[in-house]
Image (cartoon, rainbow, N blue to C red):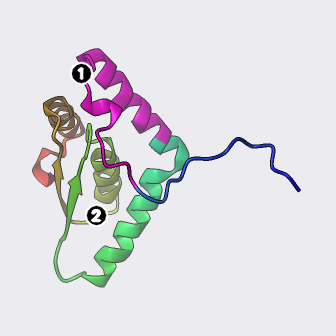
Amino acid sequence: MESRLPHSPDFGSRHPGPEWMDFGLSESQKRLNYQEIDRINRFMGVYETLFQTLVRASKEHAHKPLRILECGSGSGASMVAILKKAQKHHLSWEWTAVDVDPLACALAKEKLAKAGLSNQA
């Protein structure tokens, strides 16, 4: 049977070039993009899936706090969402988030402070 769907791109590997966020977007455009990424991740259940994966990892190493390094963290939305959930479950996790975009780092710091999680990341 012939598919009526258009040809899908190959998502088997990442494009080696810069992303749209790496180009000269205005601050307001970047903020909007970060909000949309957060909305999509929440809708798709990304944060819950990551949380459950980290819970399993922390159980395997229960004798010490789980230390997480997130490269390309963007606005820190995933970090804050997951750390809030970890806090509710009394889990001791240490999170380090890095991003090349200074605005992303500033937004992440703001989100951490607003959530009262600055001491965990």
Cα gap from disc 1 to disc 2, whole angstroms: 41 Å
Q: Secondary structure at mark 1?
A: loop
Tell me which corner region of the image, top left, top right, bottom left or bottom right, holds residue 110. Answer: top left
27 to 103, vertically: above or below: above
Q: Which residues are magenta?
A: 14-40
Q: Nearer the viewer, mark 1 or mark 2?
A: 1
Position in image of residue 73 (x %, y %): 25, 46
Question: Which residue carries the number 1 mark?
Answer: 24
Query: Which residue is drawn at the image coordinates 36% and 70% (left, top)?
Result: 55
Is 37 colored magenta in this rendering?
yes
Query: Pointer 1 and pointer 2: residues touching (CB < 8 Å)?
Result: no
- Helix, strand or loop at label 2? It is loop
Q: Which residue is mark 2?
A: 90
Left/right placement of residue 86 relative to residue 36 reads: left
Image coords of residue 85 (percent x, y): 35, 54
Mark 1 surroundings: few (<14), some (14-19) or many (≥20) residues within 10 A = few
Q: Residue at x 50, y 54 (%)?
A: 11
